[in-house]
Amino acid sequence: MGDTKVWEGERIRAYKRWNATAVGLCLCFVLGSILFLTNMGRQYTKENLVLLDNAAFQHETALVKQVEGDFQTLHGVAVFVGRKDIMDPEQLIRLVGEVNEGNAFIRMGLANPKGELELMELGGKRYPGIDISEEEFFRKALAGRDTISQPMPDPYREGEYINYYAVPIRNGEEAIVGVLCAVNGADVVRAIIEAPLLNDSGYTNLYSSQGTLIMSSGTASADGGQPQELAGLAGLSEMERAAVEEALEQNSSVHFNYKAGNTGMLAVLEPSGVEDWFVLCSIPMAALNQRYVVTSVGAMLIIVAACSLFSLLLWRQRRMMNRNRAVVERLAYEDSLTGGRNYNQFLMEAELIRRQDGRLAVWYCDLKKFKYYNDALGYAAGDDMLRRMYRLFERLEQPDGLFCRLMADNFVGLRWYGQREELTEWFGQVVREFHLEESETASRSYIELCMGFYCPDPSDSEQLTVNEMVNRANMAQKSIKGESGSRCAFFNETLRQRFQQEASMEAQGQQALSEGQFQPYFQPKFDIQHGDRLTGAEVLCRWIHPQKGMIPPGQFIPVFEKSGLIVQLDRYMFEQACSWYRRYLDGGGKQINLAVNVSRAGLLREDFVDYYVRVKEKYGIPDGLMELEVTESLALGGEELLCQLVCELQARGFTCSLDDFGSGYSSLNLLKNLPIRVLKLDILFFQRSVDKVRERIVVRNIINMARELKIRVIAEGVEETESVEFLRGAGCDIVQGYVFARPMPLAEFEALLAEAAGK
């Protein structure tokens, strides 16, 4: 009995120990499972964000490609119209109709600077007299921007919506002379955002930077539909709402959760790359968490069933994560068009290759005229061309070489070489095989290749990143892109310095204005019909840099014209001229004519006349003494606007002159229609002629014609005494040039004025 009791006690204790061990193991297993599921949940959250970001990126890419493709088509038409100077309304609308026959636009047309638009449908139906002067897309295009409007009702098709595309039309002198408009159905954009989002479980909307709904994908969300305004989203914390507002203000992306009815949603808001539009991709949390819930249930069953099932679940989960990782890597590192590596993968592999011994060159190739190929044959043919180009590079690639499609029609790569001649020979081989393949396919594209090489020194290879090397190869490519034919070039320090100088000059320009580094120089004018009397001067701009000294205008003026800083410079020089003139008159100086230049960008500003009149009145300059010079190139293509401005300026006390007449495509219409009071002849242009007799006949008759129109004539660029005598006999009023005086600083000009007053 005693033994039995002892054995029973031992069994009970052993059972308890076993139960305690089993409970402990179960608790450990449960706790381990809970920890595992918690960690897995975090991993799923990260994966969901990646998947959502990739989906948003695909929508953005498709939207940008669609819009940019449409703009490329319109640019081709705009450049042709602007450069051919086609201003006849009937000819314009006929040309637009012919061009649009090969494109997908519902309607196309051209608007003049007043906003008067005539559209033509594909079928030939015309819609004249459309006033778009108050439309935002027209104003942006007239200011020089390519723009697409938000969807708006189609006035000619009930129940349908459209988007306006607008690009500026520039003439040969880059002046905006009108706006090319095209109309596409809003369904084109809608079709992009209605692309399946994660197995059709989510939807995509477009919003403006103010948070208002631009376009809905049309896919209703569960239990509550789609949000109309971002400010009306439910279920956001104060921190998330502030993050959304900050993303809209700073044009950045943000993830957040919100409620659509009773459904929890995970969303990403990202800039679309088109106008100020944002893409909002939303997925129900239930759809995203479905796999996690199934896995969790499976895990609990594994806990009950056996550790082997738990191990199986771990194995399956691991395999699933690997599969998802492979998908993410493919999206992140594969070019969707060619199927090869993209630029991100190229950079990663290039960092490994560059560490090997040997001479390695970076090349950058661009397909010239590719956008015209796209316009002529369509985007499908263009994509096929890029894939053929990729296969050509692949076929000619070295065993240990590397390349990828960077973007659009640009390719980059690394190539080993011994001498630079090997690179040029390889480029020649690429060109030959490319054109041979084109001949065999009978495409006759006439596309030309432009390639830049950067051959780093050993020190550069250690200091520069691969991306910086690619940029240098791109600089070399850009340096020859404007030349005809297929060409290649090598990067050198001169190119880098030129690009750096332009960037530095643009950056220093604003500071130079605030520090007064720009100084007025005066080139005197002399009345040759009254004893070569000093009668006035043209105010010219000189940049006196504190370290570099005088910077020639030819170096900084083109840079400022690109950046728009030329408008501030024009106004600064005008105020400097008025300020000096006021001091000169207060000191008892005699009245003289003072001329200043006006740029194209400044003339097109809305406050142009008001500003110049306000400054003239501020310094109390008498009427008729200040002369504003506009170039002949500015007048061509915008005579109506220029005539209006000239009349208004002359009514407000200015004298207006036409500068550089004879240096461009001179038109007698300018003299006939433009109410100028002064004509400036560029004598240096005429002196390039071979036949001096014919040259002087032309000059003499221009002067006689101007005098009959009561327009004073100034000859600029006169360098010889013989030319002065000829001009005096021909009836020219004023001469400006080195024959009398070069441009001079203010002190020298004041001394010249004092000398002239003492005679």
Image (cartoon, rainbow, N blue to C red):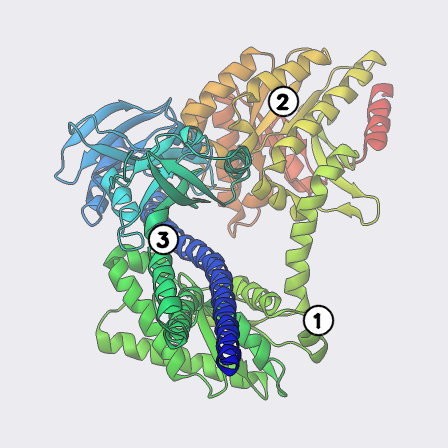
Q: Examine the image and state in which quarter residue 515 appears.
A: top right
Q: Are marks 3 and 2 in contact (CB under 8 Å)?
A: no
> As rendered, which of 294 and 657 lies closer to the eye?
294
Question: Residue at horizontal 84%, vertical 48%?
Answer: 547
Residue at label 3? 288
Q: What residue type is labelled 3?
A: Leu
Q: What residue type is labelled 2?
A: Glu
Position of 598 with respect to 78 (left or right) is right
Question: Residue at horizontal 69%, vertical 74%?
Answer: 460
Q: Name the secondary structure under disc 2.
A: strand
Closer to the eye: label 1 or 2: 1
Q: Who comes first in sequence, dot 3 or dot 2?
A: 3
Closer to the eye: label 3 or 2: 3
Residue 296: x percent and y percent? Answer: 38, 60
Q: Name the secondary structure under disc 1.
A: helix
In this rendering, the answer to whether 58 lies above or below 508 is below
Position of 431 with respect to 694 (left or right) is left
Question: Residue at horizontal 16%, vertical 40%?
Answer: 122
What is the residue that sits farthest to the front in this orientation? Answer: 1
Q: Who comes first in sequence, dot 1 or dot 3?
A: 3
Q: What residue type is labelled 1?
A: Gln
User: Which of the numbered marks, if any, corresponds to residue 463?
Assistant: 1
State how far apart marks 1 and 3 are (Cα).
45 Å
Is residue 358 in view from this perspective?
yes
Q: Examine the image and state in which quarter residue 493 appears.
A: bottom right
Residue at label 2? 627
Q: Examine the image and state in which quarter residue 221 appears.
A: top left
